[in-house]
Image (cartoon, rainbow, N blue to C red):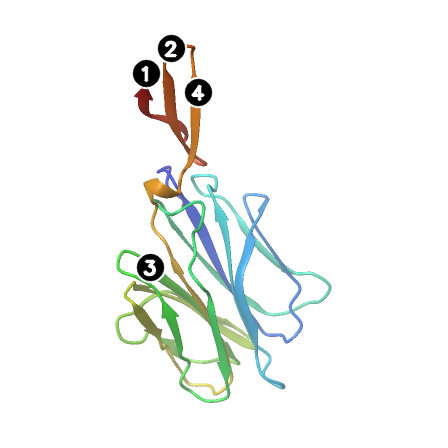
Amino acid sequence: TVNSNAERIIIVGVSLGTLSPNIKVTYGGSSMTFNAGIKGLTGNNSYAAIYYLLSPLSGANTVVITNNGSAVNIVGGAISYSGVNQDVPWGTSMTSRATNSTPTITVASATGEIVVAVLAAEGISTIAAGAGETEQWDDNLTSITGGGYTEAGAASVVISPTTTTTDWTLSGASLKPSSTTSRSVMWIGDGTNMFRYNYDTSSGPTLAGTQA
């Protein structure tokens, strides 16, 4: 359930058992934006991706994930936050893939940010959060196991969940907090004074100052 606070985001992690993704993700009927994704190595039928939507509807709404054009096993999970930078919500995304049992990515981040990562492991796997991580979801379906992880931001954050299978893909990025300097600004005059408004995409204009 998405809260009604300002500067909201909903994030959906997608783990697919395919090397040919053609994904569409919606929340409450609105199309979500792709952030990061990676396909497995040849013969490794896994794909891990992150999608998001800024200023989503508050309350409980439906997330729909489809792989257009073909049937495929999908594991998905969703988390939402408020107080997120609505102009530049993400830092640089990172992805990784391998055929071993040690999924790892290193994400550039900062104090006050949150690193979000999505794992896809081929087959039915037992997965778990690594040191310092919080597991947000963990599920499997026939040919794919998927998990979502978060960790508090720092200069460099290593995401390293564990898996019992040896074919995996991992995508991650750092979520940025809201910043007053990132808001759009409007000046409106009445012939005597100028009024400075900060415009927030979720809550609209707010009077920030007056100049004679």
Residue 115 placement, left or right of 15:
left
Q: Which residue is mark 2?
A: 192
Q: Is residue 27 above or below residue 199?
A: below
Q: Residues within 10 Å of mark 2 (few under 14, many from 20)?
A: few
Q: Is residue 176 visible?
A: yes
Mark closer to the observer (2, 3): 2
| Three-letter residue code for mark 2 | Thr
User: What is the three-letter code of the residue carrying label 4?
Assistant: Ile
Q: Which residue is mark 1?
A: 212
Give the alpha-carbon distance from disc 4 to disc 2, as whole Å.
Answer: 11 Å
- Name the residue carrying label 4: 188
**Circles 2 and 1: CB distance less than 8 Å?**
yes
- The circle drawn on residue 114 is 3
Q: Earlier in the sequence, mark 2 or mark 3?
A: 3
How packed mark 4 is, by other alpha carbons closer than 10 Å (few <14, some 14-19, many 20 or more), is few
Above or below, 139 relative to 206: below
| Quarter that holds the C terminus | top left
* Residue 170 visible, this orientation: no
Residue 15: x percent and y percent?
A: 53, 69
Image mark for residue 138:
none
